[in-house]
Image (cartoon, grey):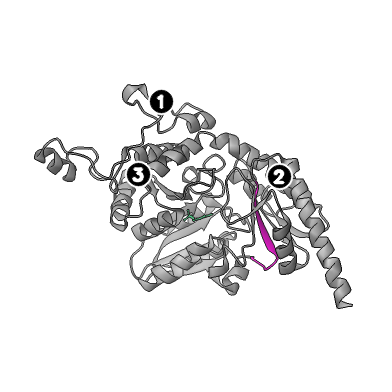
Amino acid sequence: MKDNNLNFDSKCVHSGIDEYEFGSVIPPIYQTSTFKFQSAQQGASLFAGEEKGYIYTRMLNPTVEALENCIAELEGGYKGLGCGSGMAAIHTTIASIVSAGDHVVCSNYVYGPTTTLMKSIFGKFGVQADFVDTSDINIVRASIRPDTKLVYLETPGNPTLVLSDISEISKIAHQHNCLVVVDNTFMSPALQQPLLMGADVVLHSLTKFLNGHADVVGGIIVVKDETAYTAFRKTLNQLGGVIDPFNSFLVHRGIKTLALRMERHCQSAQIIAEYLENHSMVEKVYFPGLKSNPQYQLGLKQHKGPGGMIAFELKGGLESGRVMMNSVKLCQLAVSLGGVESLIQHPASMTHYSMGKEARLAGGITDGLVRLSVGIENVNDIISDLETAFKAVKENRTKEKEFSV
Ligand SMILES: *Cc1c(COP(=O)(O)O)cnc(C)c1O
């Protein structure tokens, strides 16, 4: 049901849902790889694009399309393209935009494998990328060259939650005929809609907040108009990194509670970030919702809530991080994020290991940094779990000191 007058939380429940056989309220799972033609002529006209319909699931599948329509509506875009993972969405997007010899301006604050993909795979095919501090628009402006085709952002950035100003950067990029792509995984459309702020393409790892239940790997791209959609669909069809019908069904189900979940993620993360900021074992907290955060005002302008991700620097660096992660019980030691369960991890040795130390430090990822994805458990339970772990860190540090005397 498409109804532009509905509020966002109602759209989460109804977007991408159509009329189905037997009055089914939920989109059926069309678990089929291919679709039968009524005649040779119909097959030919489907392939020629004279008739709209389904041919083969890599090209388009109704269950996948229902999800694509849902997210396109939530992002305020033209159409979505379901991908097999967030990385497939990123790969398909970049491959749709750049050619050999083109230049890309990429944020320093992106998911580790995104940096690696730009450098290793796209670098191999003659695409040059510069990684810059996109939290400073003057640096972005100075980094754009005559051959720049794409400005690639992730905001808040992974894992230090640095913000980049989507509308200002889009204005600058468009003056130079560059497209702006935003990885909106950390916010979800419930909190931030980059296309409405001037970005040209938005993408997500569906694996995270959109699905929200840590049981699917998937990705999505949302574009603004038919021209972009046709070009991106062609690339996706050729690269082949599509999502399958069953996973699409699960993500579409997860999205029904997106607005509710994001509300709780934001509330709890705010409480936990303030608790961490006042904690004697914590050196520094990275969270856009803290008034002490230098980008707090930009956050108010750009997103409806600070999200559920927090990064913090423990006193005692790497060793304290190790003890902390071995001491939590409710917060599970795992990478990924955006699920109903709280997850904790260590970026320098885990998600951002492949980048190398130099690139990590350029993105603010020190060895003592811990990343927390705040789940929807009762916030007091999360805090008491963290408190137990802090006690273990403290005891360990005391022991270390005695040892070194
Ligand atoms: C996880 C993640 C990705 C990659 O998504 P996958 O589904 O794991 O391929 C990309 N960007 C961000 C911000 C992520 O958190």
Give the number of the disc on residue 225. Answer: 3
Q: Using the rendered image of the protein, determine whether residue 174 is visible from the camera's viewpoint.
A: no
Which label lies toward us, 1 or 2?
1
Q: Dividing the picture into quarters, in which one does residue 321 lie?
A: bottom right
Q: Dividing the picture into quarters, in which one does residue 378 lie?
A: top right
Counting residues from the start of the chain, the first of labels 1 and 2 encountered is 1
Question: Which residue lies at the image location 40% right of the left edge and 39% below the top edge?
Answer: 67
Q: Dividing the picture into quarters, in which one does residue 249 lie?
A: top left
The percent position of residue 93, horizontal first and vertical second, equals: 39, 56
Give the number of the disc on residue 270. Answer: 2
Q: Amino acid at mark 1?
A: Val
Q: Is mark 1 within 8 Å of ligand 1?
A: no
Q: Amino acid at mark 2?
A: Gln
Q: How far apart, in angstroms, are the residues tagged by discs 3 and 2?
A: 36 Å
The percent position of residue 219, horizontal first and vertical second, equals: 44, 50
Dot 3: what SS?
A: loop
